[in-house]
Amino acid sequence: MASFQDIAQEVGCTKATVSYVFNNIPQVGEETRRKVLAAAKRLNYQARKKTEKLRIAVVSSTTEFKFDYYGNAMLLSVFTTLNELGCDTQIVKSAEMLRSGRFRGAIIIGAPISMEEIKDIAGIIPCVIINRPYEGLNSVYSRSGEAVFQAMELLHQYGHGKVGFLIPDKSGVNIVYKQRLQGYLRAVKQFSMEFDEQLIQEFRSTRSDTSGIVEIIAKLIKPEPTAIIAAAEGLDIIVNYGLYILDKKIPDDISVISFENDRSFIHTPPHTTISQDFKEIGRHSANQLMALIKGQNIEPVHEAIDCEIIQRDSVKDLHLKRKFDLDKI
């Protein structure tokens, strides 16, 4: 009888890709999916009779966007762990589906449904929320606010005393962005950095609407910061583009630290990066949900996962520049 390895050799892909196709993991292109299924039919592959699996919902709006690395990386991590645990996993985008009785539990990524709906659904089936810690509900989140503080500390060590901060929302409604802003403000105070309200700017945009980029970046650099932190996934490109149009070079004219390792390293120069551990977030959220389903967690659990600061070439050491200037005197 044909195996996944036989199908992989027939198609010219990996065994893992074949597994993704048969387990409905949404990270395989449609053309590859068709080739795998066609090869399985040619080889007369017979799937083993499966025991009843736990049906788990993953709530995400990521499928609306083609290039959402954060959402895709989080989905892949969650799906991979749930698959390893033998679950039947499906992406859903409405509260009605979660109330249907079809699912034993749910992991919630992003914000396709409101917090009020989440609280209501958590009374029906076990739920775990990713990166949105909320009192009374189970959650797994990254310590991105602390990571922003550490990034500011690194800039301070390199002689930067005035840092711009770009964020999608500074109102405090989004708990993740609120924590990142708090990390920035805490560092400004602790390291006695210069501060101006204009050093904090919002950029709210869809991935297809790039209007206003140059205007926002121009406002951000008007107080003459020596560095910028792009405090959300996707803002690395916004900062790079705006600085390029304004004829500002990284890091000669201004240093940059951005979020997520997927594309920060391909910029010129590569960005120093605040990187979330998607694999660990996915693993902890899936394991936490399994514990809830088994009735092991009586009180809500909040698990915090550390981020990593990856140093690259986008941050200039101003101490070295000053030493060089003094040597010339």
Image: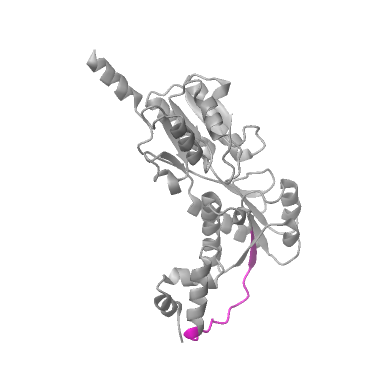
Could you tell me which quadrant the C terminus lies in? top left
- Which residue in the rendered view is the most extreme toward the top? 329
> Is residue 319 located in the magenta-colored stretch of the structure?
no
Q: Position of residue 288 (x, y in %)?
A: 59, 56
* Image quadrant where residue 253 sits: top left
Q: Is residue 182 visible?
A: no
Q: How many marks?
A: 0
Left or right side of 190 for 114? right
User: Does residue 324 sit above or below 115 in this rendering?
Assistant: above
User: Does residue 297 sit above or below 318 in this rendering?
Assistant: below
Q: Residue at x 44, y 78 (%)?
A: 7
What is the span of residues highlighted in magenta in the rendered image? 42-58
* Image quadrant where residue 284 sits: bottom right
Left or right side of 318 for 207? right
Q: Nearer the viewer, residue 303 or 67?
A: 67
Q: Nearer the viewer, residue 137 or 92?
A: 92
Q: Position of residue 172 (x, y in %)?
A: 65, 34
User: Does residue 312 sit above or below 156 in this rendering?
Assistant: below
Q: Residue at x 58, y 53 (%)?
A: 65
Q: Residue at x 55, y 29 (%)?
A: 215
Q: Residue at x 50, y 27 (%)?
A: 164
Task: Assign the magenta stretch its main secondary structure.
Answer: loop
Q: Position of residue 296 (x, y in %)?
A: 63, 58
Q: Position of residue 275 (x, y in %)?
A: 46, 44
Q: Is residue 242 visible?
A: yes
